[in-house]
Each structure stands twice: as C-alpha cells, then as structure tokens.
Amino acid sequence: MSIHNTLTRTMGAAALWAAAMGMTACAGMTQQEKNTAIGAGVGAIGGSILTGGSTTGTLGGAAVGGVIGHEVNKK
C-alpha cells in the first residue's frame, strides 16, 4: 500500500471520528444548527474522498455541505 493511500485512509478515518465526536455536543443546538454541522461533516468527508485527501477539497466540501445543511428544511 502506498503512502498516499495510507494517508487518505487515515484522513478519512479522522474525519469520521471528528464528525462523530462533534455530534455528541449537539444537545443544546437547534435543528438548523445540527443540520449545518452534519452537512459540513459529510461535505468534508466527501470533498476529501473526491480530491484524494487534499486540504482544499476537504475544506471546500465542508463549506458547501455546511451551506446545504443550513438550508435544509429552512422555514
């Protein structure tokens, strides 16, 4: 296994762990805030996977996912 594949897998696992730990702090959040956090986490993971673990892809995915999550079920 190459160092790139190992790094990508490690980054993906770290992102999943961070998202799971972040969700434990959601007790006092509104539903819209929870949706934003979930969207950002999913977007970060997706961006990381799609760009082979690049920082720019991960941050871009988090930003786009956060915006989408924020707008879901907005009244």
Image (cartoon, rainbow, N blue to C red):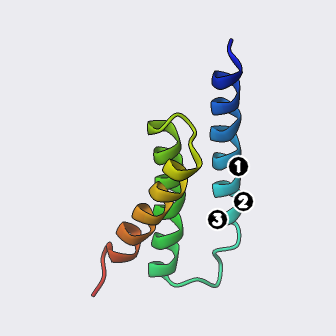
Q: Is residue 17 left or right of residue 35?
A: right
Q: Would you call the spot at circle 2 few (<14 residues within 10 Å), some (14-19), or many (20 or more)?
A: few
Q: Choose the circle earlier in sequence order: 1 or 3.
A: 1
Task: Indicate which label's residue lies in the foreground, 1 or 3.
Answer: 1
Q: Which label is found at residue 23?
A: 3
For the residues labelled 1 and 3, the Cα–Cα distance comes to 10 Å
Q: Amino acid at mark 3?
A: Met
Helix, strand or loop for disc 3:
helix
Q: Which residue is mark 2?
A: 21
Position above or below: 4 against 71: above
Name the residue at 58% across, 83% down.
Answer: 29
Name the residue at 46% across, 45% down.
Answer: 46
Q: Amino acid at mark 1?
A: Trp
Q: Amino acid at mark 2?
A: Met
Helix, strand or loop for disc 1:
helix
Quarter of the image for residue 54 reads top right
Q: Which residue is mark 1?
A: 17
CB of mark 2 within 8 Å of CB of mark 1? yes
User: In the image as oriented, which residue stretches furthest toward the left?
Assistant: 75
Quarter of the image for residue 35 reads bottom left
CB of mark 2 within 8 Å of CB of mark 3? yes
Position above or below: 56 against 10: below
User: In the image as oriented, which residue stretches furthest toward the bottom?
Assistant: 75
Q: Would you call the spot at circle 1 few (<14 residues within 10 Å), some (14-19), or many (20 or more)?
A: few
